[in-house]
Amino acid sequence: MVNNAQLYYDNVSDHIYCAWSQYGVDGDTTAEGLPRDASTTSGVYRMATDIWMSMSDDNGKHWAMPINVTQTRNEGTGLVEYETESEREMSLAINSDGDYIHLFYTVDYDPGIASPSTTPVGVATDNIMVYHSIAKSELIDEFNANAEWIRNYPLHVDSSNYYDDPDDWAWNGHVITSVKESNSSLQPDEFELKQNYPNPFNPSTLISFNMSQPGKVKLAVYDVLGREVATLIDRGMSAGSHSVNFYAGELASGVYFYNITSGNVTKTRKMVLLK
């Protein structure tokens, strides 16, 4: 069982490194000869962990067989305090540029569970925090010595079938280092008059429009004979998205047109009042 997987990209070699905590490593046996999960003679299992790493040199398409970089083992003399080490809460430095990979983790001398009891149920162990640097050259030599690379086979499930990603989840090398905020992207890029909603309507409807730049705006409503029956806006407006409610409670049912003018641009749409 693994958890806490973390990635680091080396922008010099284009290698991707992955580190994680793995529980129940082969070789972690008890005095009773029970493999993988640390266990006492009472049958209570306590999971011991090690830190493992792998590497990809082709943008994540293939990964080297993982190696154990902490190699702590239960000595097989029973599970008393300080005899089963477990590396936990591992952190992999985001910026490991240079010749070394940098890890930081807790060494748990007595792995087990936390009890909610208010009465002490054991002796506290003073776990230590460890800074661990690993030469990249040594890692690469170990990975190459394993002489086996595992291909990444992603499988996506849709509503009808299975889909094999043709790119094999290859990483494109793009790293997000910062996000630039720009208010300009929030502004409309054109002058637009939208269809009113609801339409048909009774007795009111919402008319929306976008302005790419500030200016004087006139928004008016006309009947089928071209007579102006309502002026909704006739003033300067800022750039952005705007809406106005049109109440037609005193008008007769029928077809009406709403027209907006700003500068030398005019737009018109049709709406239906249905009482």
Image (spheres, helix red, strand yellow):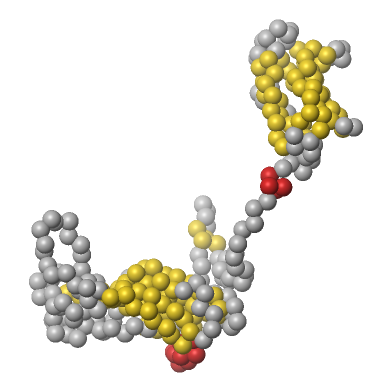
Can residue 66 be seen here? no
At x 77%, y 14%, the residue is 230
The number of discs equals 0
At x 37%, y 79%, the residue is 131
Residue 14: percent from the left, percent from the top? 59, 79
Residue 236: percent from the left, percent from the top? 79, 28
Can residue 158 be seen here? yes
At x 61%, y 72%, the residue is 173
Quadrant occupied by the N terminus = bottom left
Quadrant occupied by the C terminus = top right
At x 60%, y 68%, the residue is 175
The vertical placement of 179 against 72, above or below, is above
Residue 170: percent from the left, percent from the top? 58, 71
Residue 164: percent from the left, percent from the top? 55, 66
Within the image, what quadrant is residue 125 found in? Answer: bottom left
Q: Nearer the viewer, residue 49 or 232?
A: 232
Q: Nearer the viewer, residue 216 or 274?
A: 216
The vertical placement of 21 against 132, above or below, is above
Q: Nearer the viewer, residue 107 or 164?
A: 107
